[in-house]
Image (cartoon, rainbow, N blue to C red):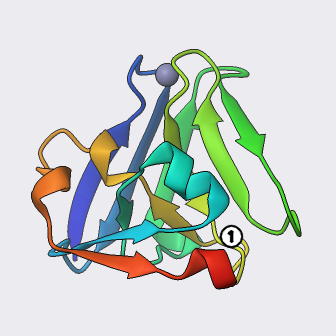
Amino acid sequence: MKKFEGSCHCGSVKFTFSIPDIDHAMRCDCSLCSRKGMVMSATVIPPEEIKIRSEQDALSTYQFGTESARHYFCNRCGIHTFVETRLNPGHYRVNLGCIDELDALRLPEIIYDGRNL
Ligand SMILES: [Zn+2]
């Protein structure tokens, strides 16, 4: 397992997580992710492998449709940091752009068919 650290742009929201490795990324084509253009972790991170720290009230959520997924964002800088997945509540995909050491936009990508989920 490798440990990664991520944060929103202003630093009010920080998170660390462990996954085997990050060798590719995922984009989702749903109505929300198309607008965000976010590059996400292809791996879903279980609750015991992620730690989230945020300054008071900095973390907000957005929900739509069936409202089963929670899309988290920093309400100070507006960056979407991670999403609690619709299929596995408590499990997360993270915004790989939030990880400084990672060249997220240059990873090979798969497209997730969120539009038809
Ligand atoms: Zn922020």
Image spot of residue 34 (x, y percent): 52, 55
Image spot of residue 68 (x, y percent): 83, 69
- How crowded is the residue under tag 1: few (<14 C-alpha within 10 Å), some, or many (20+)? some
The residue sitting at 19% across, 53% down in the picture is 104
Specify the quadrant of the image occupied by residue 8.
top left
Residue 42 shows in the view: yes
The residue sitting at 73% across, 74% down in the picture is 89
Image height of 27 relative to 105, above or below: below
Specify the quadrant of the image occupied by residue 9.
top left
Please tell me whether mark 1 sits on a helix, a strand or a loop: loop
Image height of 105 relative to 73, above or below: below
Whether residue 83 sits left or right of residue 49 in the image: it is right
Mark 1 close to ligand 1, CB under 8 Å: no
Q: Which of the two residues, 22 or 31, is positioned nearer the viewer here?
A: 31
Q: Amino acid at mark 1?
A: Gly
Count of marks placed on residues: 1
Give the residue pinned by disc 1: 90
Whether residue 60 sits left or right of residue 12 in the image: it is right
Q: Which of the two residues, 81 or 16, is positioned nearer the viewer here?
A: 81
The residue sitting at 43% across, 45% down in the picture is 15
Image height of 57 relative to 50, above or below: above
Quarter placement of the C terminus: bottom right
Whether residue 75 sits left or right of residue 89 in the image: it is left
Image spot of residue 100 (x, y percent): 18, 38
The residue sitting at 22% across, 77% down in the picture is 1
Image spot of residue 6 (x, y percent): 33, 42
Residue 43 shows in the view: no
Most distant residue in the right direction: 66
